[in-house]
Image: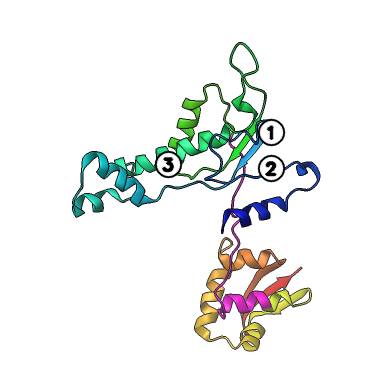
Amino acid sequence: MCPQTLRSVAKTFCTGALSNLSVGHWGAVDGKNCWKDCDVAVIWGLPYMAEHHAIDQLFAVRGPQDTSWLKANVNKQQPTLLNVIMQRHLSTSVVQAINRICCRRVIDDDGRCAPCDIYIALPKSWQGDAILSDIQHSMPGIKVEHWDYEPDGPKVYAPRNHSANEAIISFMRGREAGSTPLSLIKRELQLTQRQMGRVKEELRKFTSNLATALRAIDVSYLCTGRGRGGDKSFLVKA
């Protein structure tokens, strides 16, 4: 998505308390004074350096490396020299972005700035820890608070299309309150004996994906044992 489109999307949040929202984007932030009077910054997304740029920089200093060196250094899960170059680039960009708002200005003889808040989501990895450490080193005295935030929201179980689980969830969503025998579900959905065996196994596990998804629509599993009429198992909708 191009920067202009991103700015337009961000501007849609300019309502109420955010009526003075101002938007910037990576590549047009460094050294700018446009946000010097802002006291809150929300930094969304990180400007990851292209790996080949880091390789070019390293080759310029150390000279060309062979294929075996490249294979040993492209694992992003380890803090290799190549990955540290990319991480330090991230740290520099983030510190620059943070200091576009009012914290860039000294207001007293002790070198302090006006109160401000910066919200940023960092990766849960060594890179994220290193970026946070670099921020604290570059801005002594900054207070760090962890915030309860999931970028993708709570995880929701999404059964595979045309699966038995999907069919059962959809079937029960449309049912009225009351008990529905599993034998009826098997017949109505034309499920095989093998499919029903797997379904019952999941229903017996309170934490299974199917059981959890059914509880979300007020459906619980009830088994009263076996009798002359066969397996007495039901899905009960509240």
Q: Amino acid at mark 1?
A: Cys
Decide which of tag 1 and tag 2 comes sooner along the chain: 2
Decide which of tag 2 and tag 3 comes sooner along the chain: 2
Near mark 3 (Cα within 10 A), the count class, few <14, some 14-19 or many ≥20, is many
Task: Estimate the x, y position of residue 196 in percent, counting from the top left.
Answer: 55, 80
Q: Main secondary structure of the magenta part?
A: loop
Q: Is residue 74 left or right of residue 10?
A: left
- Name which residue lies at 51% across and 46% down: 46
Q: How far, Cα to Cα, is label 2 from label 3?
A: 28 Å
Decide which of tag 3 and tag 1 comes sooner along the chain: 1
Tag 2 residue:
22
215 and 222: which is toward the camera: 215
Q: Identify whether 97 is placed above or below 191.
A: above
Task: Estimate the x, y position of residue 148 in percent, counting from the top left.
Answer: 62, 42
- Quarter holding the N terminus is bottom right
Q: Secondary structure at mark 3?
A: helix
- Span shown in magenta: 146-170
CB under 8 Å between discs 1 and 2: yes
Tag 3 residue:
127
Please tell me whether residue 167 belongs to the stretch shown in magenta: yes
**Residue 87 in view, yes or no:** yes
- Quarter holding the C terminus is bottom right
- Name which residue lies at 62% across and 79% down: 167
Q: Secondary structure at mark 1?
A: loop
Q: Identify whether 43 is placed above or below 103.
A: below
